[in-house]
Amino acid sequence: MQTIPIVTATADMVLAKDVKRSDNPDGPPLCGKGVVLTSSLINRLENMGIKTVTVEGHPVWIEGDVTIEQQLAALERRFKKVANLPLMQSLMEMYRLQILRSMGEADGR
């Protein structure tokens, strides 16, 4: 999942979290998790003052973003010294799946 500025949102992106008003974060959501964005919905959210939305996957690449391959290689490096410990390998696999899920890869779902 990725939090992006509303101005970079496009139709067909799917919300990964509820959208709530910043002036009433405990109030009911304006849009629920799983809603597919449309151009008109994006415009309405912008007009309501919504600045960011959290969408599924990682659809917008911003300078400084790291690819899945780079993240997984870094994970391997971090766990290299404990490769022979089953508990640490289980922990590494949990992190690997979380990276895949956060980047929208089907393998991690």
Image (cartoon, rainbow, N blue to C red):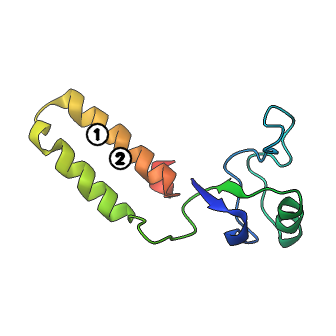
Distance (Cα) linking label 2 and label 1? 6 Å
- In front of the other: 40 or 76: 40
Q: In the image, what residue type sits under mark 2? A: Arg
**What is the quadrant of residue 85 in the picture?**
top left
Residue 66 location in percent, x, y? 38, 64
The residue carrying pointer 2 sits among few (fewer than 14), some (14 to 19) or many (20 or more) residues within 10 Å by Cα, namely some
**Mark 1 residue type:** Met
Spot occupied by residue 19 in the image (x, y as percentages of width and height) = 77, 48
Q: Position of residue 33 (x, y in %)?
A: 74, 46
* Residue drawn where x is 18% and y is 51% of the image: 77
How crowded is the residue under tag 1: few (<14 C-alpha within 10 Å), some, or many (20+)? some
Q: Residue at x 50, y 70 (%)?
A: 62
In the rendered image, the residue lying farthest to the front is 23
Which label belongs to residue 96?
2
As drawn, 81 above or below 71: above
Disc number placed over residue 92 in the picture, else none: 1
Residue found at x 83% / y 49%: 31
Q: Which mark is residue 16?
A: none
Give 31 or 45, whichever is nearer the viewer.
Answer: 45
Residue at the location (69% across, 46% down)? Answer: 17
Q: Secondary structure at mark 1?
A: helix
Residue 64, compared with residue 76, is above or below; it is: below
Answer whether labels 2 and 1 touch (C-beta < 8 Å).
yes
The quarter holding residue 36 reads bottom right
Tell whether 93 sits left or right of 41. Answer: left
Q: Considering the numbered disc 2 on the image, is that residue within a helix, a strand or a loop?
A: helix
State the image coordinates of residue 103 (x, y, percent, origin top left): 49, 57
- Total tally of numbered discs in the picture: 2
20 is higher (above) or lower (below) than 6: above
